[in-house]
């Protein structure tokens, strides 16, 4: 990839917008860019080299395989987010992997030692990264709290509310989300079953809180959904 294109991608990435031109050029030196298609696997947590991934464009899911061979989705990663071997151990489990959800993604990758050196060299980068990680941890903590303290229907409502906040677009009908998740994937994200999610979505439809189809989800009133 040409140096100018690398610079443009990093210059416009949220985490790096406050850096100087010289600092962004420094980031370009060790950055590796990947362009991948839907369904491709980006990494496994048990890979020999620790890496950090910055999602320039697209959507991915972070999953792991349990002992029965079932996929458990842990997170959905959107444009501007990061993932990989965080806090020295990544998401922690050896069967974890990231998979492309959108038709295509563009990813910036660093070897962890290289990125750590960049943060030591540029304190403003270290500060921005710390803030990003803090926001990510707060979101993870909220999700785990939902798993502990809320029943399945409340977890589904909380998930749809969060999804609307992150990706919803305002429309005359309400908040519209482009639906790219199956009932099984939603079930995995909220620790439930596909059958239960299907039943609860039908309940929410009858209550007038959502309009649901394979292509899109409409939430007429996000505040009412969360209530």
Image (cartoon, rainbow, N blue to C red):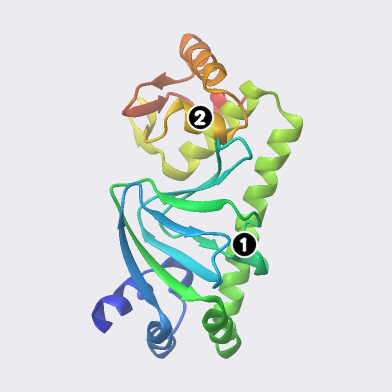
Image vertical order of residue 57 relative to residue 187, above or below: below
Circles 1 and 2 in contact, beta carbons < 8 Å: no
Residue sitting nearer the eye, 72 or 165? 72
Q: Secondary structure at mark 2?
A: helix
Residue reaching furthest to the top: 206
Residue at 70% across, 48% down: 141
Residue at 63% across, 70% down: 130
Residue sitting nearer the eye, 212 or 42? 42
Provide residue 157's location: percent of width, then percent of height: 57, 27
Provide residue 166's location: percent of width, then percent of height: 47, 45
- Numbered badge on residue 222: 2
Crowding around mark 2 (Cα neighbors within 10 Å: few <14, some 14 to 19, many 20+) is: some
Provide residue 138's location: percent of width, then percent of height: 66, 52
Residue at 43% across, 71% down: 109
Provide residue 101's location: percent of width, then percent of height: 38, 45
- The quadrant the C terminus occupies is top right
Residue reaching furthest to the front: 68
Question: Image quarter for residue 25?
Answer: bottom left
Q: In the rendered structure, which disc, 1 or 2, sits on the residue that comes first in sequence?
A: 1
Image vertical order of residue 144 relative to residue 219, above or below: below
Image vertical order of residue 145 relative to residue 157, above or below: below
- Numbered badge on residue 90: 1
Crowding around mark 1 (Cα neighbors within 10 Å: few <14, some 14 to 19, many 20+) is: some
> Looking at the image, how many numbered discs can be counted on the residues?
2
């Amino acid at each position: 990839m040409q140096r100018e294109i690398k610079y443009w991608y990093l210059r416009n990435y949220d985490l790096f917008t406050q850096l100087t031109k010289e600092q962004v050029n420094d980031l370009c030196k060790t950055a590796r860019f990947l362009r991948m298609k839907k369904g491709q696997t980006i990494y496994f947590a048990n890979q020999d080299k620790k890496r950090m991934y910055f999602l320039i464009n697209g959507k991915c899911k972070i999953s792991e395989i349990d002992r029965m061979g079932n996929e458990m989705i842990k997170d959905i990663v959107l444009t501007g987010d990061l993932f990989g071997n965080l806090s020295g151990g990544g998401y922690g489990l050896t069967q974890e992997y990231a998979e492309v959800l959108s038709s295509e993604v563009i990813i910036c990758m660093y070897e962890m030692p290289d990125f750590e050196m960049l943060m030591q060299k540029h304190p403003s980068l270290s500060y921005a990264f710390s803030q990003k990680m803090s926001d990510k941890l707060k979101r993870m903590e909220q999700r785990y709290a939902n798993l502990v303290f809320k029943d399945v229907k409340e977890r589904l409502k909380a998930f749809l509310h969060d999804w609307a906040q992150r990706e919803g677009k305002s429309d005359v009908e309400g908040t519209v989300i482009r639906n790219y998740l199956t009932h099984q994937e939603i079930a995995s994200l909220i620790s439930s079953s596909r059958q239960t999610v299907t039943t609860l979505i039908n309940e929410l439809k009858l209550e007038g809180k959502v309009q649901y189809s394979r292509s899109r989800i409409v939430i007429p009133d996000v505040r009412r959904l969360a209530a």
